[in-house]
Image (cartoon, grey):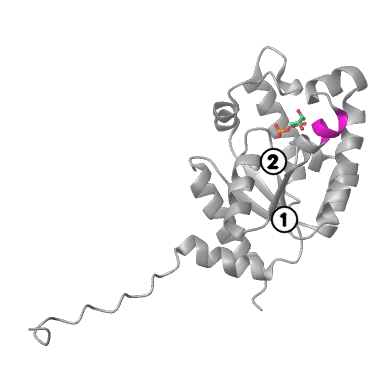
């Protein structure tokens, strides 16, 4: 009876999911932080956090670190100390982060538009511009209260103006990704594919 029973088929080893395979290869080749730049609502924090998890590396958000260190919100820093003081805090915070091991860093939207900060990031990190149209940005931002630059009456007009003023600066980033129409997951996959293409093979 026993001899008649079919031997149960050997379990086939599970193939790693495409994202996991890609992430493993990228993590092994990454020798510097990856810094996400772009306008408010471009997905720097959401995409960055998810990519870091997939890559098995750390994630830092420069705005969050500044708020923690200052003990007040970004809107309050702008109001009490002025935008230039905030930009100085941003440069110092990012300067410290570039010294750390490979990780993903989300910057505030204006950080890369200040020459000293941009130079620091271009020299020591791999910079990625997450680009999207002003309409897409606004639909993702939702609550504009936490963004002092959007405190005027027309956030879409402000985003359009900032896009016109800043696009040529964001263009200096090493990698460009258009995230219009992409979910957080698909934008993260686009980021992984771009890193895979950009990083030299070992
Ligand atoms: C700013 C963007 C904000 C924040 C500050 C100024 C900007 O960050 O740093 O309100 O100048 O574009 P997010 O891009 O994370 O919203």
Question: Residue placed at 84% from the left, 48% from the top?
Answer: 118
Question: Residue placed at 85% from the left, 58% from the top?
Answer: 123
Badge nearest the viewer, 1 or 2: 1
Question: Residue placed at 50% from the left, 60% from the top?
Answer: 19
Query: What is the x, y in percent for residue 185?
Result: 50, 47
- Residue occupied by mark 1: 103
The quadrant the C terminus occupies is: bottom right
Query: What is the x, y in percent for residue 94?
Result: 84, 46
Q: Main secondary structure of the magenta part?
A: helix
Mark sitting earlier along the chain (1/2): 2
Q: Which mark is residue 38?
A: 2
Q: Is mark 2 within 8 Å of ligand 1?
A: yes
Q: Nearer the viewer, residue 28 or 34?
A: 28
- Ligand 1 is found in the corner quadrant, namely top right
Q: Which residues are magenta?
A: 66-70
Query: What is the x, y in percent for residue 55?
Result: 61, 59
Q: Are marks 1 and 2 in contact (CB under 8 Å)?
A: no
Q: 153 above or below 9?
A: above
Quick check: is 49 in the magenta stretch?
A: no
- Are there few (<14), some (14-19), or many (20+) residues within 10 Å of tag 2? many
Question: Residue placed at 74% from the left, 60% from the top?
Answer: 102
| In-image side of 36 versus 8 (left or right) | right
What is the distance, in whole Å, between disc 1 and disc 2 at their CAs? Answer: 18 Å
Q: Provide the secondary structure element on which disc 2 rests.
A: loop
Is residue 106 visible in the rendered image? The answer is no
């Amino acid at each position: 009876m026993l001899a008649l029973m079919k031997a149960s088929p050997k379990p086939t080893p599970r193939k790693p999911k495409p994202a996991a395979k890609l992430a493993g290869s990228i993590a092994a080749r990454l020798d510097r932080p990856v810094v996400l730049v772009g306008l408010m609502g471009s997905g720097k924090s959401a995409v960055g956090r998810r990519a870091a998890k997939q890559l098995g590396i750390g994630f830092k958000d420069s705005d969050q670190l500044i708020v923690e260190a200052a003990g007040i919100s970004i809107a309050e820093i702008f109001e009490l100390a002025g935008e230039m003081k905030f930009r100085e805090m941003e440069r110092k915070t990012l300067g410290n982060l570039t010294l750390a091991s490979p990780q993903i860093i989300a910057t505030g939207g204006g950080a890369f538009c200040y020459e000293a900060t941009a130079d620091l990031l271009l020299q020591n990190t791999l910079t990625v511009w997450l680009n999207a149209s002003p309409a897409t940005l606004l639909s993702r931002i939702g609550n504009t209260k936490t963004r002092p630059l959007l405190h005027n009456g027309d956030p879409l007009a402000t985003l359009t103006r900032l896009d016109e003023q800043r696009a040529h600066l964001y263009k200096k980033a090493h990698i460009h990704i258009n995230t219009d129409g992409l979910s957080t997951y698909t934008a993260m996959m686009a980021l992984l594919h771009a890193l895979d293409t950009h990083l030299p093979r070992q």
